[in-house]
Image (cartoon, rainbow, N blue to C red):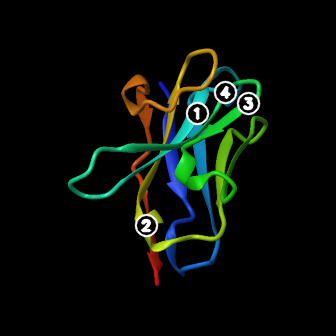
Amino acid sequence: QVQLVESGGGSVQAGGSLRLSCRASGHTYSTYCLGWFRQVPGNEREGVATIDGDGFASYVDSVKGRFSISKDDAKNTLYLQMNSLKPEDTAMYYCAAVKTEGWVLDYLQYNYWGQGTQVTVSS
């Protein structure tokens, strides 16, 4: 069983930065595909970034060049550095994990989820 706890959300003005963290307990990150997702009420959950066990990452087009996903296997912690934030980045952000090879941006493939952390970007 993997338990995930996010932190680092908050409110920021457009153009600002935030770093989200997601700490795992119950298992190690090194063999899992990890992802960050976001959801606005009434909309489907959206894959933002994903990183596989070897550290290869992929991003949704809307955040490429602005967001960076990384992980520290020794600390069992996943990060999402978000720069040049835009009001349309406002959402609840979730981290997730699935034991699989490669990276996956489809939220339906993930079976472990954190509780979410709110990110609000004002114009």
Secondary structure of the residue carrying tag 3 is: loop
What is the CA distance from the residue labelled 3 to the residue labelled 4?
5 Å
Which is nearer the N-term, disc 2 or disc 4? 4
Residues marked 1 and 4 touching at CB (< 8 Å)? yes
Label 2 belongs to which residue?
88
Which is nearer the N-term, disc 2 or disc 1? 1
Q: In the image, which is nearer the foreground, mark 2 or mark 1?
A: 2
What is the CA distance from the residue labelled 2 to the residue labelled 4?
26 Å
Residue 97, horizontal then vertical, whole percent = 52, 31
Label 3 belongs to which residue?
56
Residue at the spot 67% in from the left edge and 44% down from the top edge: 77
Q: In the image, which is nearer the foreground, mark 1 or mark 3?
A: 3
- How many residues crowd around disc 4 within 10 Å: few (fewer than 14), some, or many (20 or more)? many
Please tell me in which quadrant of the rendered image residue 49 appears: top right
Secondary structure of the residue carrying tag 4 is: loop
Label 4 belongs to which residue?
52
Label 1 belongs to which residue?
34
Residues marked 3 and 4 touching at CB (< 8 Å)? yes
